[in-house]
Amino acid sequence: MIRVGPDDFDAAAELAALHARAGDAGAVATFTGHVRGEDGLAALILEHYPAMTEREIARHAAEAERRWPLLGVTVIHRVGRLVPGARIVFVAVAAHHRRAAFEACEFLMDYLKVHAPFWKQEERVGGTSWVEAKTSDDDAAERWRR
Amino acid sequence: MLYFAWVRQKVGRSEERLDLPAGIATVRALAEFLERRGGGYAQAFADLKRLRAAVNQEHVPFDSALAADDEVAFFPPVTGG
């Protein structure tokens, strides 16, 4: 299940839905990303490329399913104006065993960071500025290459 | 063409249609053509190392070939997650 949009999500409900869908999952790993309120940040404004975003995430979910024996994947990514503390992203992976669930969850987050077409703008009292991509994120995605 | 993030801000629009000019056969050639328009385009396309491109909603290198009805997007490196 992949969803991209402005709406907030209920992580517990998404987990229950994933577990129900996944059948006999012995392991579910999740990651939830929140907006950090560092350095006087008022909000993050997220823009994306709608026609490409879900396609790109689906491609990575399919890649995760090729690499690990998964029973279900949920990826939710919010866009629009998000204040500190708000949820931005949710990745949940169900599998028979924990290692596949942990690894696939991390793989999906690492790939999403460097491939999914989202752009963040930081809103502060003095104005807004675009967040620069980090090479550490490229490195994190690169280590999955094989 | 579609423009996102600061590329959109610099060129002053989010999308436009263009009949592929003669001799423009790659994404790089299109970017260089747009840079020659000057103004915000010159700023946005001055340094292709700061840009990424997609053709028909897939990431591509700048040397990729273009066809007449392609949807080409230019944007900075992504910062989601």
Image (tube, coloured by chain):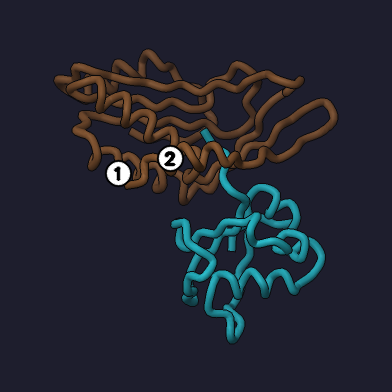
Chain colours: A brown, B cyan
Check whether the beta carbons of the residues at disc 1 and disc 2 lie within 8 A of each other: yes
User: Farthest residue toward the bottom?
Assistant: B22
Secondary structure at badge 2 equals helix
The chain letter under disc 2 is A
User: Farthest residue toward the top?
Assistant: A12
The chain letter under disc 1 is A
Hey, what amino acid is under mark 2? Answer: Tyr
Identify residue for label 2. A111
**Residue A88: x, y in percent?**
53, 26
**Residue B22: x, y in percent?**
59, 86
Residue A63 circle label: 1
Residue A76 circle label: none
How packed is label 1: few (under 14 Cα within 10 Å), some, or many (20 or more)? some
**In the image, B18: left or right of A64?**
right
Marks 1 and 2 sit apart, C-alpha to C-alpha, by 10 Å
Secondary structure at badge 1 equals helix
**In the image, A112: left or right of A65?**
right
